[in-house]
Image: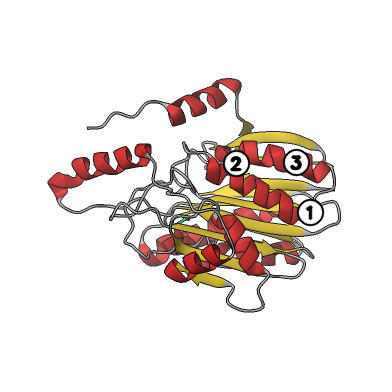
Amino acid sequence: MYGIIATWRMALEGITEADKMLKEGSSAGDAIETAVKAVEDFEYYKSVGYGGLPNEEMEVELDAAFMDGTTLDLGCVGGIKDFANPVSIARKLSKEPVNNFLVGAGAEKYAHRHGFERKNMLTERAKIHYHNRVVETSANTELKPYSGHDTVGMVCLDCEGNMTSATSTSGLFMKHPGRVGDSPVSGSGFYVDSNVGGASATGLGEDVMKGCVSYEIVRLMKDGMHPQQACEKAVKEFDADLKRRRNKAGDMSLIAMNNKGEWGCATNIEGFSFAVATENEDPTVYLVKFDEDGKQYFEVASKEWMDNYMKTRTAPLVRK
Ligand code: GLY
């Protein structure tokens, strides 16, 4: 059995490519890196890689991680600037005996030394978003972080039973320079153990980190839960806990897959989508919906939804 699952519709093209690779016997490491890179390279996704939205000083700072669920090797970068594919740098770091998590200038020096592609990640479109946000908030004087957090997070299983997880994000739009979210933090943004399965998160990093939610899902799967049950239990209980203690809970959406290729997803927001492909299922985008009793269910995205998604993402932007 093989498979790959990822947060958000934006992962579809990447997981489609990964699905083909897995079918032909590629490793979970190569397949997931290829899938995440496809998202990082697409300039219209404004929260990952090239085209990602900048911090309050108009600089794009990127976070990414890679974990091998068989060796438990992990590599992470935080606040890295001007490199095309942070996930590849994270993967390379995962092979190091120490110094696996590098941030800022240290991460950039490492990437430079190892020949990773340099690229100015700030697009003209991202500059317009920045400008418009400054104009919109000038009346309030304070720049507020953007409320969307569309990190790409994935879990992958190959035919040999090896599993990986990887994430990539530009984090919060208008974040403070140096702010790092959950995405490169093991147990929070991602976790994978080939003996069990893996999970990955998107949402408000500051809250996801309070509950180490990815690790919690893997732990529940280790206790025998199906990925769907594990995701629902972890997200529901932690969302309620945050609300009890703090009166609010940030956005939190998790995807998971176990080492049999069974998968699950849970969220505390409206409008979440995810993409999945397995040996038994062609690449598919699901939308997460809630019924009148607040029970979550999935719907396959319609052609109209898919067309509209791309139209909205690529629509011309007007400078205010
Ligand atoms: N989940 C991404 C972030 O908070 O940076």
- Image position of 198 with respect to 299: above or below: below
User: Residue shown at 43%/48% (left/top)?
Assistant: 121
User: Residue shown at 30%/51% (left/top)?
Assistant: 58
- Image position of 46 with respect to 82: above or below: above
Quarter holding residue 216: bottom right
Q: Which amino acid, by three-letter code, is at mark 3?
A: Asp
Mark 3–mark 2 CB contact (< 8 Å): no
Question: What is the C-alpha distance between the residues marked 2 and 1?
Answer: 18 Å
Q: Earlier in the sequence, mark 3 or mark 2?
A: 2
Label 3: element kind = helix
Rendered location of residue 117, percent (x, y): 54, 53
Label 2: element kind = helix
Residue under circle 2?
Answer: 11
Label 1: element kind = loop
> In front here: 225 or 147?
147
Seen as rendered, the residue at the extreme top is 304
Quarter holding residue 69: bottom right
User: Residue shown at 82%/53% (left/top)?
Assistant: 260
Residue 19's tag is 3
- Label 1 lies in ligand 1 vicinity (Cβ under 8 Å): no
Badge nearest the viewer, 2 or 1: 1
> In front here: 31 or 212?
31
